[in-house]
């Protein structure tokens, strides 16, 4: 028997060995630092099933099946220890007395739970069939195998109980209620038959269990190791940190990913961790608005290609349209129960297109890149006039010695776009009312580089980033506030990698703090609103409460849209898409506006110039301009400043 | 094949133009600089031809001007040109087309260029003379403002746009000079490896005198910036309110509604 088991384990190990050689087609990456922390996280994620439980319908039956199987596994190991180690060698009985009663009950219920969990999953997969859940023959076979293992387990128990406990010790049998039910099937058999049947069933059960072991690495069952194991390899950097690109080393002549081998081993491990549960796809704004991108399919495509011999043609396999459709909104990564990193892969492929081919989603995007290069903004407007919006406002242009309390990193949209200039003016009025003096870089500020970086143009990003860092250093500023979440993440997280080490804040938390400390007095006026969470704040920074607190302080009665907070729905402008025409499918912003209107709120509030621009454009397109008003958080607050204070 | 591309660095047209101290041309302070758009079409077409011809073709990018123009030469190299030539001339922005053409022709003479690509005109001075003057001085056939180019065994077929969107097709034999118009192509975005390579490339630096700078034929009198018109007004709303607003404006700001039509 042990020989058989050993053989099955060997087949399993060999299978994982084959997978390992696939993972090792990727480049090296250190995801082994701080092993104890990683192990703790792995254990917590796996045993609590917290990631899979984020969605109840599939998550709860999965967790029940998992916990049931886990107990059964522990129980089986204990039996093995008892039968083949403790009894023969030490003549010690572990499974007896009270412990055995508890053991019997726990295993009995675990088996029942696992069966129920499996049944619920089967109902979901074969009857409910939620969108995005694809069923292959292997899935059906796995369901049957698991069912057969659990069912034969109960049959064995019943058969054993029929000739032992049920007759000799009915009190003990009561501790195995499910087993006792099954035992009734066998009470009509005589002892010898029952023993024969028991042996036969046991062998069948064993055989199926060994088959289960052997097929783990070769089917989706490998997720037992890879999905849970992926918790071990999660990135430890702040969310949204991209792979560094060495622009100094002149010997590097290849950037980004155009073949499977350009990815890291973790990227390829991700393809094995995916169980095609479809959660990412059902939240992907690109997928849901008819664009040819599914995060799930992206991972499957890379996995399929990695399994081929040559591994080339990555861009064609995934398709340019899919690559450029991503808004890097992070909805996929947020929900993924398998810790898969979709966005890093997208960015690597975009880097290949942008840096190696000079390709962008459209000609307008290429022109925007050139405009940023020459003028420091994607509109191609004069860089010198960048600070003109502040003329006549209590704002100083900082040069050399910084007297102002904060440096307001204005960003391109608030500097040039007439709609967003109103947001900048509102922010300045708020600061004025709170007694905070504001300085700006004026013509020395350039685009923060976030959109072009997300489009793969790392070189241009680095160019503007270094110029901005020099300007910020020269300004002598000690504290930076920005009203754009894209600028915010870029300055606070990405510029840090390049050596900028100043506190950076987004205006939503900055205003929230002013109100909380009593520096900003508001005269609340009641209004009904719904907050659109910027992906860069909610999902990249876990900032969802502060903007809501600000709105409430201003008198807002908030209703939530069907997707909100960390589960919010993108406006369509992330990932550099703000610089590209949306030619495929329907506009993402229109879908979000539909959700906003459905919430019943009169005002849709955002805290991001990109979101605001997308919604204003969407309203213009739809001729429903009066159906809902869109504005920035700062505009709401500025219109409610208490004049008496 | 030996190809020459003539490029000029121009200020971005969104900049604020103010006269310089002498009042003869604009002050360069605060302006952002980039490759003249028409010259980018010329670079792109030359590089495409080179790629079609394979290893045998070489493209030389030439620019005349102060040190800042090196950036545009490197951009041309990053787009795929093989060699960069900088005629280092601080006076170039104020030189007349004849002088510029004299230097280009002086450089090109005897170097065996079979094709010369130039922009149709510069975005700042806009004289559209340099290309044709160079052709004349080098004795090359010339077609201006081309919108399509096709190379066929030592000869080429080009298209020119005429008034009102009409087009004509011409056939020329090399050696020739072509000036490039919008619509010819979409200039590529340079790849990073090429940008890196262009940064390392050594440029040939020549003095204006060494390439035969001649004296001007036309001198610049003065330069006046654009005088802005009164700002436009964009009205918003539905037809009824728009009509009312227009009426209001006509009443208050114009005389068209005064005294009826009997004037």
Image (spheres, coloured by chain):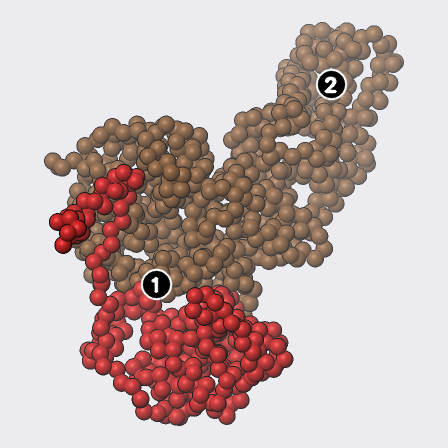
Chain colours: A brown, B red
Q: Is residue B119 above or below residue A425?
A: below
Disc ID at residue B77:
none
Secondary structure under the numbered disc 1 in the rendered image: helix
Q: CA separation, marks 2 and 1?
A: 74 Å
From the viewer's perspective, tell me whether residue A342 is left or right of residue A208. Answer: left
Please tell me which residue is depicted at 70% across the width and 41% down the height of the picture.
A217
Please tell me which residue is depicted at 48% across the width and 90% down the height of the picture.
B139
Secondary structure under the numbered disc 2 in the rendered image: helix
Visible in this render: residue B227?
yes
Residue labelled with disc 2: A154
From the viewer's perspective, tell me whether residue B125 is left or right of residue A174. Answer: left
How far across and down, in percent of the image, does residue A14 sit?
Answer: 74, 45
Q: Is residue A325 above or below residue A64?
A: below
How far across and down, in percent of the image, does residue A428 sit?
Answer: 22, 47
Residue labelled with disc 1: A375
Q: Which-is-in-front pick, marks 2 and 1?
A: 1
């Amino acid at each position: 028997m042990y020989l058989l088991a050993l053989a099955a384990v060997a087949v399993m190990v060999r299978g994982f060995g084959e997978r390992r050689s696939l993972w090792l087609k990727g480049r090296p990456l250190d995801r082994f630092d701080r092993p104890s922390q990683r192990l703790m996280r792995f254990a917590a994620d796996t045993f609590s099933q917290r990631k899979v439980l984020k969605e109840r319908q599939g998550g709860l039956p999965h967790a029940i099946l998992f916990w049931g199987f886990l107990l059964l596994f522990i129980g089986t190991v204990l039996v093995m220890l008892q039968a083949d180690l403790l009894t023969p060698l030490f003549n010690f009985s572990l499974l007896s007395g009270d412990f055995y009663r508890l053991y019997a009950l726990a295993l009995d219920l675990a088996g029942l739970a696992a069966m129920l969990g499996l049944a619920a999953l089967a109902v979901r997969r074969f009857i409910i069939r939620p969108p995005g859940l694809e069923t292959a023959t292997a899935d059906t076979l796995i369901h049957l195998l698991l069912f057969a293992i659990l069912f034969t387990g109960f049959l064995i128990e019943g058969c054993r109980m029929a000739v032992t406990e049920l007759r000799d010790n009915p009190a003990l049998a009561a501790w195995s209620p499910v087993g006792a039910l099954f035992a009734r099937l066998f009470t009509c058999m005589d002892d010898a038959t029952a023993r024969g049947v028991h042996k036969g069933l046991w062998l069948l059960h064993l055989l199926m269990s060994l088959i289960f072991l052997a097929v783990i690495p070769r089917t989706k069952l490998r997720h037992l190791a890879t999905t849970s194991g992926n918790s071990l390899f999660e990135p430890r950097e702040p969310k949204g940190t991209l792979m560094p690109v060495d622009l100094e080393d002149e010997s590097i002549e290849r950037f980004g990913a155009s073949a499977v081998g350009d990815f890291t081993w973790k990227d390829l491990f991700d393809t094995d961790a995916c169980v095609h549960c479809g959660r990412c796809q059902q939240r992907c704004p690109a997928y849901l608005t008819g664009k040819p991108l599914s995060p799930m399919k992206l991972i499957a495509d890379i996995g399929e290609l990695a399994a081929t011999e040559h591994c080339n043609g990555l861009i064609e396999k995934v398709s340019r349209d899919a690559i450029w459709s991503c808004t890097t909104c992070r909805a996929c990564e947020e929900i993924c129960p398998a810790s898969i990193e979709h966005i890093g892969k997208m960015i690597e492929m975009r880097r290949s297109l942008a840096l190696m081919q000079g390709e962008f989603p459209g000609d307008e995007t290429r022109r925007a890149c050139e405009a940023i290069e020459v003028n420091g903004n994607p509109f191609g407007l004069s860089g010198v006039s960048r600070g003109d919006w502040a003329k006549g406002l209590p704002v100083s242009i900082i040069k050399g010695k910084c007297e102002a309390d904060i440096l307001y990193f204005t960003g391109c949209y608030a500097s040039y776009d007439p709609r967003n200039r109103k947001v900048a003016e509102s922010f300045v009025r708020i600061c004025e009312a709170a007694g905070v003096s504001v300085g700006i870089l004026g013509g020395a500020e350039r685009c923060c580089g976030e959109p072009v970086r997300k489009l793969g143009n790392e070189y241009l990003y680095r160019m503007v980033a270094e110029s901005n860092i020099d300007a910020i250093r020269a300004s002598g500023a000690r504290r930076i506030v920005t009203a754009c979440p894209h600028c915010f993440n870029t300055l606070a997280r990405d510029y840090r990698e390049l050596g900028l080490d100043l506190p950076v804040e987004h205006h939503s938390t900055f205003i929230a703090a002013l109100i909380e400390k009593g520096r900003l007095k508001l005269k609340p006026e009641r209004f009904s609103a719904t907050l659109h969470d910027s992906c860069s704040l909610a999902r990249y920074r876990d900032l969802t409460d502060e903007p809501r607190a600000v709105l409430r302080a201003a008198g807002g009665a908030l209703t939530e849209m069907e997707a909100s907070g960390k589960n919010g729905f993108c406006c369509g402008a992330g990932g550099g898409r703000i610089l590209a025409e949306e030619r495929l499918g329907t506009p993402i912003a229109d879908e979000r506006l539909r959700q906003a209107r459905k919430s019943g709120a009169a005002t849709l509030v955002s805290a991001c110039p990109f979101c605001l621009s997308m919604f204003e454009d969407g309203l213009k397109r739809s001729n429903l301009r009066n159906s809902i008003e869109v504005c920035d958080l700062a505009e709401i607050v500025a219109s409610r400043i208490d004049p008496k204070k | 094949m030996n190809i020459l591309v003539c490029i000029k660095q121009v200020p971005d047209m969104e900049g604020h133009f103010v006269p310089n101290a002498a009042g003869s041309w604009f002050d360069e302070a605060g302006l952002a600089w980039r490759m003249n758009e028409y010259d980018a079409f010329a670079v792109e077409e030359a590089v495409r031809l080179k790629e079609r011809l394979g290893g045998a073709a070489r493209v030389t990018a030439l620019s005349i001007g102060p040190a800042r123009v090196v950036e545009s030469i490197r951009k041309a190299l990053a787009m795929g040109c093989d060699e960069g030539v900088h005629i280092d001339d601080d006076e170039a922005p104020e030189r007349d087309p004849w002088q510029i053409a004299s230097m280009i022709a002086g450089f090109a003479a005897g170097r065996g260029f079979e094709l010369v690509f130039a922009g149709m005109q510069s975005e700042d001075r806009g004289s559209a003379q340099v290309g044709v003057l160079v052709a004349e001085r080098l004795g090359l056939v010339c077609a201006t403002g081309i919108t399509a180019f096709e190379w066929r065994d030592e000869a080429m077929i080009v298209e020119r746009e005429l008034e009102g969107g009409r087009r004509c097709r011409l056939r020329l034999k090399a050696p020739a000079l072509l000036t490039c118009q919008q619509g010819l192509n979409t200039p590529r975005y340079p790849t990073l490896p090429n940008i890196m390579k262009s940064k390392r490339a050594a440029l040939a630096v020549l003095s204006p005198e060494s390439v035969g700078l001649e004296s001007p034929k036309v001198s610049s009198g003065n330069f006046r910036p654009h005088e802005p018109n009164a700002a436009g007004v964009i009205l918003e709303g539905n037809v009824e309110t728009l009509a009312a607003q227009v009426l209001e404006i006509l009443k208050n700001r114009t005389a068209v509604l005064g005294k009826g039509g009997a004037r």
